[in-house]
Amino acid sequence: MVKTKVDSEELILDAARKVFTRKGMTGARMQEIADEAGINKALLHYYFRNKKQLFDAIFDDVFPRFIPALIQILNSDNSIEEKLSHFVSHYIDEFSHKAYIPVFILNEIHQNPERLASMSMAIEGMKTSRFMVQISEGIETGLYHPIKPAHLLSNLISLSVFPLISQPLLTRVFQMDDKEYMQFLEEKKKLIPELILESIKRN
């Protein structure tokens, strides 16, 4: 039984994350969120007056945790190889049991383009990172093929996110149990940086 306000709010937020991930803000209903949380609608409205307030609380909690650690990795003094490895490992470790987060953000981008302002700032932070400076220096010295930041960053992010958001498909098609799937993710931590490096390095 829920005993504190903090417990009640977390219960509601957990339920809302699931519903918003499935349906986005437009398709979600407060009653559905209340049902998911196992509470009545009146209690839901006691903590969150409307759907927008609830959605904003979740988005403001999710997005700030999604980007800063990744930008910190890209701005470190490590080598390109180390940064790629740390980026992918951190991404997979952080979201392997919370795949709803990137799905949640992608859904919100599509359904509410006004959210792109905060997204754009995050991407700009990646684009101007020390990582991209190192890539530019490598291109100038002939170490790397010329590649646009948009291609490099989108390749890195998409290769990292797809194994997480497609877990139901991958485990069914390749007949993996939970243990085999986690091993698959561990292998991805090594494979993805290698693929990125192979795609940009000159022979």
Image (cartoon, rainbow, N blue to C red):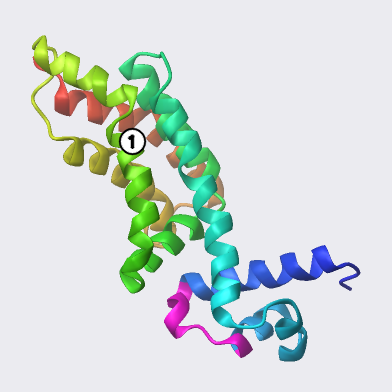
Viewer-proximal residue, 79 or 197?
A: 79
Instruction: Measuring from the top left, give residue 154's x and y in whole percent.
Output: 25, 44
Residue 28 within the segment the image draws in magenta: yes
Instruction: Measuring from the top left, give residue 108's x and y in whole percent.
Output: 40, 67
According to the picture, the residue beneath numbered tag 1 turns out to be 126
Viewer-proximal residue, 21 or 62?
A: 62
Residue 138 visible in the shown view = yes
Identity of the residue drawn at 13% across and 12% down: 143
Viewer-proximal residue, 136 or 117?
A: 117
Quadrant location of residue 173?
Answer: bottom left
Q: Is residue 121 left or right of residue 32?
A: left
Q: Is residue 18 left or right of residue 22?
A: right
Residue 171 visible in the shown view = no
Residues in magenta? Answer: 22-31
Identity of the residue drawn at 43% across and 82% down: 26
**How many numbered marks, from 0 up?**
1
Viewer-proximal residue, 177 or 122?
A: 122
Q: Is residue 82 left or right of residue 19?
A: left
Identity of the residue drawn at 49% across and 57% down: 101
Residue 197 within the segment the image draws in magenta: no
Q: Secondary structure at mark 1?
A: helix
